[in-house]
Amino acid sequence: QEFLRCVAEEINHALENGIATRLLVLLPQKLRDTAVSRKKCDFDIEFLDEGLRRCEALVLKCPCSICDKTVPGDTLCMPDCSVSKRKLLMNVLARTALDFDPARYSHGDITRLVVARHSDACRSRLERRSFARAVIQRAKRDMHVAASRKRTQRIEALRDAMGAGAFSEMVSRQLWTRRTRGSSPSGGQDWAQTLQWWHSDEGMMYWNPPPQPHPQHVSDVLRRGLGRGLPGCFPVPVEKTLEVPKSVVPYLALRITDWLQERQEERFPGLKSRCFMSGRVNFNREDGERVPSVHISCKQHMGDNLVLLDAASLENLMPGDVVVPRALLNVNGRVVATVAWEDVALALPRPHDKFDVYLRGNMPPTSRLAVGWDLTNTLEEAELHIVWLCLWGRSMELVVKLVGTEDTAGNATDETLQELWQSLSNDLASHYAPMYQRFLVRRRLYVDLEERTTAALRSLMQCTRSLVQPMV
């Protein structure tokens, strides 16, 4: 009774201040709403006693796999769990009443203790559910990967049977048929649904071409060749070979190009450089693995937020093919090597795509986007040639070869990648520093020569004027 009296006082104090305290769970729903609307709890203490008895009678045990953290790896939906936040709060109130000591009580202690214990119980519940959600997400991803690989196996088998040229023509015909297979849009339920969708917020996104990213994020920064010129212009290159886990090869190559671009644009723009990269891909084609062909776009009105669009051409590389990219980009954790530029239009989703020609005409609106290969999981070897061009003097060339090895312990962690990059960046800096110092010395000599030449020309002009003026 003493505990319930203290609870009633704290509830009244909270309601007077406009706070819906968690202690109201002891009351039935109707009385709870009445107390909140009246900002006063003047009901008989028997209602609180009845609510506390319900809390004490509650058995908080659930045999589900969420509470036991034993969610099967192939689970695709969240299992049923009887443990709710309300039940956790009722259990906390029962334990608080059992531990209540009137001699040590001061006003507000029950609320503070219940809030702290309930918050801790909710955090534990959230951790269990997050663990289960992660298992389900992995299972869904594995399911989609398996379905995608089966689809790729069918596509590649058809490509091998028909030949690459005939297969490409067939895909083009099917894309056109897909846009024109709809009957006359004069009526019908399908056309009415498509017309309603076309004027919705989702459909209006297809009125315009895909948005173009900011040019500085997708520009061609890698050269197609070094253009060595006359013999003797470049010394023998310095080669460095690194054997690293295959999963980190694309990320190390990306960091090298970003490192070079940062020094070229921000720190030392006067020291020109050239970079050429080639990479070899390797994957298990028989198991349905592939190198996705993607277009690089961005979110609407957000040119800095890049996104990937899956290309409809169904193009693919073969194991062992060599890719010579124009740029390496990081798009939401994926490493993409751009190789060309294409005019790209958005494909309407099913089932509205069959009325595409009626909605957007024979030529839908297009924008010029970079097309590339997603090398995140397939780049096995990469070779980067970095050349620093100095003022009237011999330049320096560094060749970095990244060779991927099988990672027996699984995919390399971020710590492994950071350690490898730290060692590689130190090597790049040690090779770059002498070149930059030489560049500073030669630029200083060049500036001195320019100043002396300017002074000599000024003196010559003055002498010429002094000789010409008497003759005039």
Image (tube, helix red, strand yellow):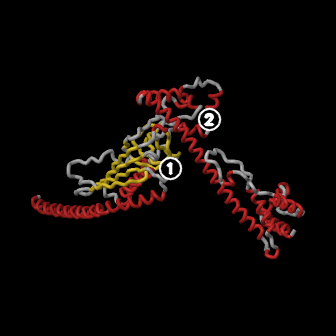
**Residue 11 coordinates in the image, percent (x, y):** 81, 65
- Position above or below: 439 against 222: below
Residue carrying label 1? 332
Q: Say if 207 sits above or below 405 in the image.
A: above
Name the residue located 61 percent from the left edge and 50 percent from the top edge: 135
Q: In this figure, which residue is indicated by the disc labeled 2?
A: 197
**Residue 438 coordinates in the image, percent (x, y):** 26, 62
Relative image position of residue 403 (x, y in whole percent):
38, 50
Q: Is residue 93 above or below residue 314?
A: below
Amino acid at pointer 1: Asn
> Is 270 on the left or on the right of 378, as rendered?
left
Can residue 309 be seen by looking at this rendering?
yes
Query: Mark 1 or 2, which is nearer the eye?
Result: 1
Q: Position of residue 40 (x, y in %)?
A: 84, 63
Task: Count numbered badges in the picture.
Answer: 2
Give above or below for 12 relative to 172. below
Locate residue 467: give its quadrant.
bottom left
SS at badge 2: helix
Q: Which comes sooner in the sequence, label 1 or label 2?
A: 2
Tell me if mark 1 has few (under 14), some (14-19) or many (20+) residues whose alpha carbon lies within 10 angstroms of its own: few
